Image: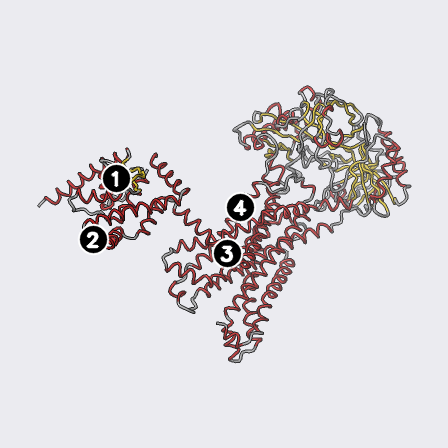
Amino acid sequence: MRTFFNELWLRIKALLNRKQLDRDLEDELVHHLDMRAQKNREAGMNAEEARYAATRNLGNVTRLKEISREMRTFAWLDTFWQDVRYAARVLGSKPAFTAVIVVTLATGIGANSAVFSVVNSVLLESLPYRQENQLVMVWETNARTGNDHNVVSPANFLYWQDHNTVFEQMAAFYDDTSTLTGEGEPEQIPSQGISTNLFPLLGIAPILGRDFSPDEGLRGHNHVVLLGYRLWQRRFGSDRGIVNKTIKLDGLSFLVVGVMPPNVTLFAPKGSLSGKVAELWYPYGWREEDRKPQGRWMSAVARLKPGLKLVQAQTQMEGLVAEITSMYPDFEASWGVNVVPVHQDMVRNIRPSALVLLGTVGFVLLIACANVANLLLSQAASRERDIAVRSALGASRWRITRQLLIESVLLAMSGGALAILAARWTISALVLLIPKELHLASVDLNSRVVAFTACTSLLTGLLFGIVPAFDATRTNSSDALREGGRSETGARGHRLRNVFAVAQISLSLVLLAGAALLVRSFLRLSSVDPGFNPRNLVMARIDLPSTKYPKDAQDIDFFQRLLEQVRVIPGVRAATTDNSFPLTGMTPGTSFNIVGKPTPPAGQDRVTEVQIIGSDYFHTMGIPVLRGRTFTDREQSLMSHVVMISEQLARQFFPNEDPLGQKLIIDMKKKNEPCEIVGIVADVKRAGLDVIPVAMSYWPHAELPFSSLMLAVRTDGDPLTKVGTIRDIVHRMDPDLPLSDVLTMDQSLSESVARQRFGAVLVAILAGMALFLASIGIYGVVSHAMSLRTREFGIRMALGAKAGDVGWLVFRHGVTLAGVGVAVGVAAALVLTQLIRGLLFGVSAHDPETLAEVTAFLVGITLGACWIPARRATHADPLVALRYE
Amino acid sequence: MKDKRENPGDLLQGTLDLLILKALAKGSMHGYGVAEWIHESSQDVLRVEEGALYPALHRLELRGLLASEWGTSDNNRRAKYYALTATGRKRLAEETEYWRRMSGAVARVLQTA
């Protein structure tokens, strides 16, 4: 071992001190020659003879030095560096050629880096929690609806928490909104109710003050609050004295115990009312009733015990659910449990699109590679002699191949470096496209993106370099050295170039097909009739705190008076209220029974969503009434036990009879009376344009009093211009009431398809890049082929061929390429578009129309790219062409 | 660790290494001195191929069998002196032993009628 280090040390010393080493070698050999010459002279030779004999004796001094030097240094490193410098010189001597390649590669690699930076932040960036890989979400599953990410019942949560042995801890949270009053405008703050162990479980500590204590998680002791960092800055001016002060939430006093660090963004995608990131937290106050099985509305997160596997947790949780089912068969039938790693849970909606994007941008890079490989191949002819000379002088094939590969890696690395330089702009351009709903906090150029770019560049260099390099070194040196000799390399390189051109056409076709499908799918989705009229419709939330409005009658009265005043604002056409935003919010649901029909067995309840509506609702929203009538003014203000239903509810629960006049009983109130169906309205796509509407029932505000309602106002022009007036009216009625979540329905509709739009736009941009690169590639191949055949064309024309014939020869080449490329591309597209099936709406992955359009378009572009060289060929002067060589 | 005798079949190189080690057993010497010593000690039978001598010296130095030092030679010139290291000395003993056995064996084979 010691000798090994000795050797390494000597080598490193030699590497650092090359000049000294060379001088030493020289001195040593000169000394030897001197000594030998002296001895020769002593033996009687004259000076010249003596030196000559000494030199002859020692042999080739240069070679001796080389042997010793190579022995001592890292020979490969030495020659490697030599190759790099040589490559830089070669590339520097052809600046235009080099620039074209570097820019092409920078485009391809840069697109990859930009998309990777997004994917990195979406899929790979770890969440800011302690040992995130141990964290899991625990959802309930419903076998009937197929929902495997259902929110959890508090009773089940408590049972799991008490009986499991697989988790260190389990915590619960739910999204809420709290009205903050006091200094300044009253404001609706997205908040979360949490179990007191949530933050310790996640490993997040307040930056100021303290976390909740366990006894603050009991009903009655829970009037304490932790502020979010942003709220603390914005609303309290980063006042460090806020701790132990009291603030007013929903009309009640809460003691501020601490401030949380920035970027605490835990939110349950499915349990979220608003989809907003919470800005304050209060402890959920547990009580004994929570152990009784009732509704499901919490999200559960847990930390696995060290060393335990996910499947072990899942198995035990299933066992616990079975126990609950045997205790409460009605409540728990057809329900199950689903344990999901937190990270996977957060990215489950976005993962497929992210992977498709990464694949797409990889295709673009492949096309860029094919382009560059083509350029290198067309250079091969001019390099041929150079390479032949080197190999005749004894360079091994490996050495020459390596030299060429180093050249291509150098090109790719330059492209990568340029891409990194441009990344700041490409990434910020990309960020502009990203819909806000994705909550991407940190898309930036971090070390992982740089490392990805470096690796991509290296692989790219090897990928596009390897074929031209091996091809170039296959040359027979004696052929190449013969003056004017045209070796076979041209023909072979030409075949390879054709292969690359075909590959480019096929790859482009696949990308174009994918892009066209996504765009078409997006257009289909955008043109879906949501079931209500979103034009000039604005909605806003008003929460009446129960402390100030304890009686239902007060709520009903407040909203009726509000509507009366809003309706008389000039420019307001109609106004009403309901209890959830279409497209962006959650709608409450309940089970129900039909009078005169048997109660369904446990687990197969009839379920309907519930809308609590104000007067003039269907007219304001533009929802067609299909049969029966709407509610009268009297029914709106006095409980009259009437209900209206959606088409879907009628279809689903009254398949062969008239629903009008039938009576429903919902399980939502303390005292549930049968209510008569008086009307049927058309379905509304509340859950999203691509989601089939579920059964819906509409109740007058008087029937189901609600303290948190949405005001919906339809205006003549831009509805946002009326918001100020509406806010003034609310303010006059109650200065402590905020008007929050103001949203126009056009905006909301557009946001609901933001992700699909993002995907379609990005893939379309990438497909455009691919098409551009591919058409340059095809142009290059065809015109290069033409230049090789210039002499042939000259002869043909001299022998009487018409210009058109020659043009056709060139054009035919292009047509052949296009034909083969399209055939391969269509076959590949049929397979690969399957991968985006899940992202498509209203269009099949094999949509023949789309595929035909894309094919026609691509053939057109290809022929266009061939047409230019073909035209040039027809204009060739035979004399010039013949003189060409 | 590599096999101590790399290229065991290459008798010539192994022999040259052995002769160099032996030459330096008495004390340090420069390259020319090593060549001359071998030539003289073998009573002019063995003449070292001088072209092979220096690469061999450098290789042995790299292996840690020799150490080198710059000094001044008899004729007042800068010269590189080589000396055995402890490893080199051990190797010399092993190689000598090996050589004795080999040459003895070869001699016995040749003696059989």
The CA distance from mark 1 to mark 4 is: 52 Å
The reply to whether callout 1 and callout 3 are in contact (CB within 8 Å) is no
Q: Amino acid at mark 2?
A: Met
- Quarter of image, res B68: top left
Of badges 4 and 2, nearer the viewer stands: 2
Mark 3 or mark 4, earlier in chain: 3
The CA distance from mark 3 to mark 4 is: 20 Å
Query: Is label 1 in a helix, a strand or a loop?
Result: strand
Q: Amino acid at mark 3?
A: Leu
Name the chain letter of the residue that bears numbered label 4: A
Confirm whether circles 4 and 2 share one chain: yes
The CA distance from mark 4 to mark 2 is: 65 Å
| Label 2 packing within 10 angstroms: few (<14), some (14-19), many (20+) | some
Of badges 2 and 1, nearer the viewer stands: 2
Mark 4 or mark 2, earlier in chain: 2
Query: x and y percent of residue A73 in the render?
Result: 38, 44
**Residue located beneath label 1 in the image:** B29
Query: Is label 3 in a helix, a strand or a loop?
Result: helix
Q: Amino acid at mark 4?
A: Ala
**Residue located beneath label 2 in the image:** A45
Look at the image and tell me whether residue A396 can be seen. yes
Q: Amino acid at mark 1?
A: Met
**Residue located beneath label 4 in the image:** A454
Q: Residue A492, relative to residue A573: is it above or below?
A: below
**Residue located beneath label 3 in the image:** A91
Confirm whether circles 2 and 3 share one chain: yes
